[in-house]
Image: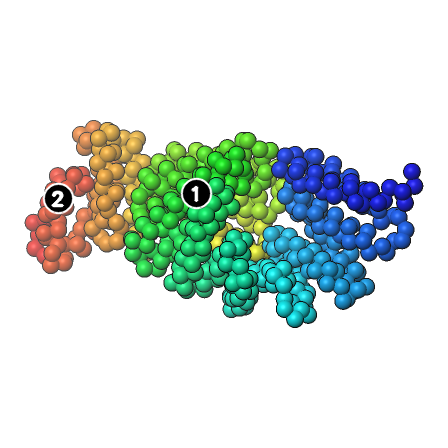
Amino acid sequence: MPATMISAPLRTIVLPSLHRSVRFEGNQNVATIGAVVGLVLAIASTLMADPPAKDVAKLRELSVSYTNLADERWQAGDAAEARSLLEQAVRIDTELWQAAPESELAQRDLSISTERLGDVLRQINELPGARKLYEQSRDLRQRLVNRQPKPDRQSQRDLSISLERLGVVRRQIGDLPAAEADLQAALRLRKQILNVDQTNASAKRELSVTIVLLGDVQMQSGKLDAARSLYEQALRLDRELWEASRTDSTAARDLSISYEKLGDVNLRLAETTNRREHAAKAREYFQQSVKLRDAVVAASGKSTAARQDLALALNRVGEASLKLEDLAAARQAFELALLVREELVKSHPPSRMAQRDLIRSHEKLGRLCLQLEFTDRARENFQQALKLAESIRKESDDIESQADWAGVAGYLGTAEMQAEDFAAAARWVEQGIAVLERLPTDGSSPSTFRYRDWLARQREQLARCRQAERGLRELDFVATTAATDPKRAAELLRIRARDQSRRMVPADSAVSLRQAMDRVRATDQIPFARWLALAANAVGGPPEKLNPPDVIERRKYVELTIELLREVRKSPEGKDALQRLANEADFAALRSDPGFQNLLKASP
């Protein structure tokens, strides 16, 4: 059949149907999407082969095909193909507009494809390019508004969207005054649209979105009270919409976002003012967000996006609980978020985003377990995170996946340091450093400064591992360190004392030692002397059972302790301080020592 005979039905019936098919299959099967995409492009190419080649309707249909297919490619995770398709759509729409510069339809089509391409660039972090495209889209839409004696709602709405997009990308770049100006202009348009029809739910929702975005700019500018006021305005609008239709998942999600934003600003206020009530209020808002997002998950048939939102809200509850020092609640929230993300990875073909989110959850819970001194559990979390990071690296060994792996290796090193297995800690940290040293530090990556900071911290961590290993072997090294860094030397002596106590002292003595460690801070001579005394007490057990090497080592600890306590004795309160120390279990190894007894009796 000649192409001219099939073009019309292809254009008017088959092609739109296939577009709808792609949208339907988009949430079902990525392979099906690819097959339909190929078919649509083949049909579009057939249409373009029909004369006349410059048929405006056919060109526009082809542009629409490219734009729609780019949306599906993006949903399938193929950013490169989405970008390529949109670039072709922009070229076609530009050609059509240049051929008919007075055509409002051509101008609007170009503004749409330009904006979509900007969205893709923004998502892949090419922010300057995205800003330029958004500016072009805004200019096109501003011309359309200016040409109309009384701009219609659609033109105003289109312009408000461009201004919003531009405000968002400028905020991401860091140009906050320009971002605020763009969003204020969008806000004025949103209010004008709503004033025409006060009952319009869509207009009310879009106004709420703009208010939230403006609040984000105020947050980033450090204007927390202004941000809170804006978020409260958005909350009122979103609550009205939700109460009007409690079965509307979109309204529930919007309301949950407003609660979350108010939680974020209160958490920031808690950090800046150190007032507990702000953290408590933040947690209340986050808990409201969790309730709504849990309901959305149930109503949506456990959609991926809804569960991702729920995990984020649970993590926010955990963060607020940490600020309130409610570690049990924080752990519960982080564990629930972890379970949600584990389900996401298991119940779908494992997307990279879902895997990376799960890595973050394991890291978050692992860090909390370190804080709780659940070292074994922390190590398990980090090991799970490392498996995921290794899996991602095998599929795509790019900068992002390398950074993920290096970060988890660093956390594993921290866990081993807490377990005081410094050799294992050093191995993990060294591997993390080796990866970080290969990442860009020349400004070519937006994360350059973050990588530099990680590298500096892991190098410092490795140095501490090496110092600890040496401190376990060499008392002379510890004593030398005391002259320049007493706090670090005391830490090394604590490590040494704990290691010796684990190997040589009965369990009840180790418990006593642990309690001492919890209450002592190495900030002056007395705590430093206490660590020395603990080390002396840990060597070998009861004095009558010591072998000759243990006697010599214990004597070193005792002599260093007495040397420090002589300095303490010189102060006006020194004698009373020594009498108190003599009665402490920590100093049991010194009580029978003649030098210590003479020190207690001597005059200041």
Residue 186 in percent (x, y) is at 55, 64
The correct choice, above or below, for 102 with respect to 594 in the image is: below
In which quadrant is the C terminus drawn?
bottom left
Q: Nearer the viewer, mark 2 or mark 1?
A: 1
Q: Amino acid at mark 2?
A: Ala
Residue 509 in percent (x, y) is at 22, 33
Residue at image x 26%, y 42%?
Answer: 517
In the image: residue 3, left or right of residue 590: right
Q: Which mark is residue 292?
A: 1
In the image: residue 470, left or right of residue 76: left
- Which of pointers 2 and 1 lies earlier in the amino acid sequence? 1
The correct choice, above or below, for 53 with respect to 590 in the image is: below
In the image: residue 169, left or right of residue 488: right
Q: CA distance from mark 2 to mark 1?
A: 60 Å
Which residue, given by chain and number where applicable, does mark 2 sit on?
582
Residue 324 in percent (x, y) is at 31, 48
Residue at image x 48%, y 54%?
Answer: 453
Residue 186: in sight, yes or no?
no
Q: Amino acid at mark 1?
A: Leu
Q: Which mark is residue 533?
A: none
Q: Nearer the viewer, residue 252 or 278?
A: 252
Residue at image x 45%, y 34%?
Answer: 339
Say which element carries label 1. helix
Q: Are marks 2 and 1 in contact (CB under 8 Å)?
A: no
Residue 513: in sight, yes or no?
yes
**Based on the displayed image, in which of its 4 quarters is residue 29 positioned?**
top right
Q: Nearer the viewer, residue 266 or 163?
A: 163
The correct choice, above or below, for 254 with respect to 542 in the image is: below
The correct choice, above or below, for 357 with respect to 178 in the image is: above
In which quadrant is the N terminus drawn?
top right
Residue 217 in percent (x, y) is at 48, 62
